[in-house]
Amino acid sequence: MEKDVMIVTGAGQIGMAIARRMGYGKKIILGDKSSENAQAAAKVMNDAGFDVQPVELDLSSRDSILDLIAEAEKEGEITMLVNAAGVSPSQAPIEAILKVDLYGTAVLLEEVGKVIAQGGVGVTISSQSGHRMPQLSPQEDEQLACTPTEELLSLELLQPGNIRDTLHAYQLAKRCNEKRVMAEAVKWGERGARINSISPGIIVTPLAIDEFNGPRGDFYKNMFAKCPAGRPGTADEVANVAELLMGGKGAFITGADFLIDGGATASYFYGPLKPRES
């Protein structure tokens, strides 16, 4: 018997929290760069009564993304997408960040958008980082939103001489995610489907704990200590937002980005986290 299918990319805590919240009764196709991680997460979910099939996924490869979608279509209609895959500034060089977080996300939204079912819905996990960098020009924003995917990495603003470091590359990737979601929402809407992005701040995950204990640990601890919430967030709080966006109560929401960072970005611009002028 065919089921409605949910595609989840990224077997980390945020992706799995959303899958637990929204994936009951569905066939979940779980893609991750590490087949071991995908299998381990699938076992936990399946032992809790879900129906999860792990698949190895390279988000930087269109062929790998198409293979994932083909696997999903064997099971039924694709009705949900949760894109929580990506790499962080401390995990990867500039080229990998742009290839995975920027190009890969754009390809995934494009290809799923071609086959998403009527009434389908997707969320992609962006980041507060996309809200921190200086505003781009309207022309640059439009380029990030609308440039054909295979030409994205050739854009002038994404060339090595225009990118300072891995954090800047990550900020550009996440800004592109937000703009891409807006442009894709128009196309998804032609199929009666919706797509939004969520931009989390510091969320407690194994990766975040590594960061807290690493060379940038004091920076992160200071960020959540001085944000209005006074603490980091949890994956389930991100899932709360996803539940709204992916459910019936969010039926009028598409092409939007939701910042969930405990007010850290507000503090960065207008509070104690504001960078001091040198």
Image (cartoon, rainbow, N blue to C red):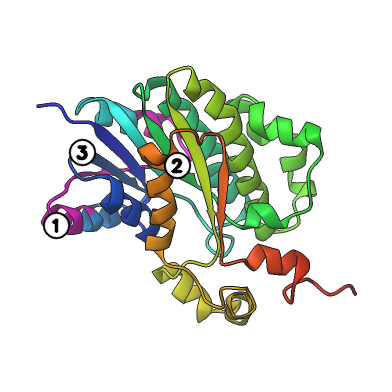
Work out whether 277 lies above or below 169.
below
The percent position of residue 185, horizontal first and vertical second, equals 53, 28
Mark 3, residue position = 26
The quarter in which the C terminus is drawn is bottom right
Q: Residues within 10 Å of mark 2 (few under 14, many from 20)?
A: many
Q: Amino acid at mark 3?
A: Lys
Q: Residues within 10 Å of mark 1 (few under 14, many from 20)?
A: few
Verify CB contact (< 8 Å) between mark 1 and mark 2.
Answer: no
Mark 1, secondary structure of its residue:
loop
Q: Amino acid at mark 1?
A: Ala
Q: Nearer the viewer, residue 121 or 178?
A: 121
Q: Residues within 10 Å of mark 3 (few under 14, many from 20)?
A: many
The percent position of residue 168, horizontal first and vertical second, equals 70, 55
Which mark is first along the chain, 1 or 3?
Answer: 3
Which mark is first along the chain, 2 or 1?
Answer: 1
Mark 3, secondary structure of its residue:
loop
- Quarter of the image holding residue 275? bottom right
Residue plotted at (17% across, 56% down): 43
Is 144 magenta? The answer is: no
Q: Nearer the viewer, residue 17 or 110?
A: 17
- Quarter of the image holding residue 14? bottom left
How many discs mark residues in the rendered view? 3
Residue plotted at (33% across, 57% down): 17
Residue at the outermost right position: 278
The percent position of residue 258, horizontal first and vertical second, equals 55, 49
Mark 2, residue position = 123
Work out whether 150 lies above or below 40.
above
Looking at the rendering, the stretch of residues picked out in magenta corresponds to 42-67
Mark 1, residue position = 48
Residue plotted at (34% across, 23% down): 117
Q: Is residue 234 visible?
A: yes
Q: How far apart are the alpha carbons under marks 1 and 2?
A: 23 Å
